[in-house]
Amino acid sequence: MKKSCTYLAALLITVTACKKEDVKNESATTDSTTVATEKTATESAKPMDSVAMMEAWKAYATPGDMQKLLADESGNWSGESKMWMDPTKEPEVTTMKGELKMVLGGRYQEGKYTGTAMGVPFEGKGLVAYNNATGKFEQTWTDNMGTGIMFMTGTYDSAAKTITYSGECVDPATKQPKKIKQIYQIVDANTRKLEGFDTGPDGKEYKTMEITMLRK
């Protein structure tokens, strides 16, 4: 019996010592991981080398091929506009004019458009950019048919020569956001086609406009 008690006591001492060692090792591992994480965070928080920073900003600010794509559209355009207020009915067909030019050193495309919509004079302004940092097109749109600013981002498909834009706007009737999409196609050197899509109450996408512009 005495031998058994002595053996049991020794076993308990050994187990306890092992557990303490495990805790010690775990603590050391945790401390090591924490130090490594803090080191990585510190390294990433270090300010960028001034030369590298200047090069990054230079690349961001320098017009390239995508800005040239926009610049190629500079000039006067005219065309036909089809608008669907109700996707189940025939569209309203009108004519419109557009004047496009590059601004701020060839970095942005500014567009001014006039025409008629729902029987009243229509005027709209657009600003298009290619963001060198994100690799995406960005556009804003304002017109006299509302009081908000629409913002969309898009990606360019060089094979199809199209920019597909997506974004959100607030439905004036429901005051709720809804998804919108536009497909801008470079048909040829003197023809452009823009298709717009809205989202209905059922969540389904439907076509709201189609504009074909010809260079004058």
Image (cartoon, rainbow, N blue to C red):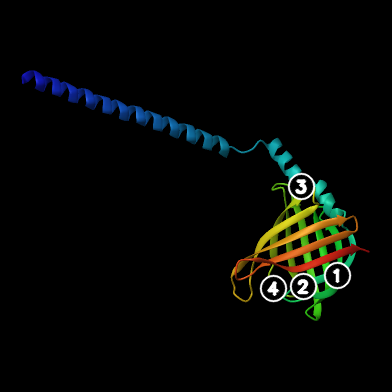
Q: Foreground residue, 74 or 188? A: 188
Residue 190, x across and y down, in percent:
91, 58
User: Which one is closest to the eye, mark 3 or mark 2?
Assistant: 2
Pair 3/1: label in front: 1
Q: Can you tell which quarter of the image residue 34 is in?
A: top left
Label located before the other in sequence (3 or 1): 3
Q: Which residue is mark 2?
A: 83
Q: Give the Cα separation between the discs numbered 3 and 2.
A: 37 Å
Q: Earlier in the sequence, mark 1 or mark 4?
A: 1
Separation (CA) of disc 3 from disc 4: 31 Å
- Which residue is disc 4 drawn over? 147
Q: Nearer the viewer, residue 77 or 186?
A: 186
Q: Amino acid at mark 3?
A: Ala
Q: Judge whether 141 appears above or below 25 on screen.
A: below
Q: Return the x and y of residue 167 as percentages of the image width and height.
A: 66, 61
Residue at label 1? 80
**Number of residues whose C-alpha sits closer than 10 Å to that of mark 4, classed few (under 14), some (14–19) or many (20 or more):** few
Name the element at disc 2: strand
Could you say whether the residue bearing mark 3 is in a helix, strand or loop? helix
